[in-house]
Image: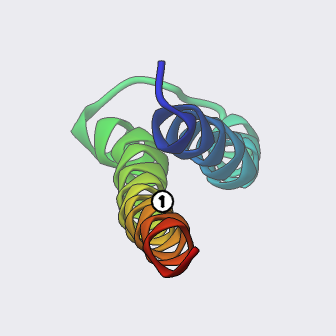
Amino acid sequence: MKDWMVRALKTFVQAFFGVLIPEFVVMLRDGSVMGWNKFWTLMVPVLCAALAAGISAAWNIIAEVLKKQEEEDAESES
């Protein structure tokens, strides 16, 4: 598995639980975990985590490409 994939997956898990835990506490305080409103409450962490993972993946792919270009430039100058 590529490094950027691992980093994006870690970011997804961290963001997911970082948003899910407070959302779940609010759901439990209301006393019900059923219904469409609660479903959408659980979807918020998934969407936030997916956005964070996408940003992480893009960032790490760009960093990987730039690093590879620098290495190739350094080799060609030698």
Q: Secondary structure at mark 1?
A: helix
Dividing the picture into quadrants, the one containing residue 65 is bottom left
Q: Residues within 10 Å of mark 1 (few under 14, many from 20)?
A: some
Dividing the picture into quadrants, the one containing residue 30 is top right
Q: Is residue 24 left or right of residue 45?
A: right
Count of number-bearing discs: 1
Which residue is farthest top?
Answer: 1
Vertical side of 49 occupied by 59: above or below: below
Q: Residue at x 36, y 65 (%)?
A: 58
Q: Residue at x 74, y 43 (%)?
A: 21
Q: Nearer the viewer, residue 65 or 32?
A: 65
Q: Is residue 16 left or right of residue 51?
A: right
| Quadrant of the frame with the C terminus | bottom right
Question: In the rendering, at what x and y percent does residue 40 appear?
Answer: 30, 47
Question: In the rendering, at what x and y percent does residue 44 appear?
Answer: 40, 54
Q: Residue at x 73, y 52 (%)?
A: 18
> What's the amino acid at mark 1?
Glu
Q: Is residue 8 left or right of residue 55?
A: right
Question: In the rendering, at what x and y percent does residue 29 appear?
Answer: 75, 44
What residue is disc 1 on? 64
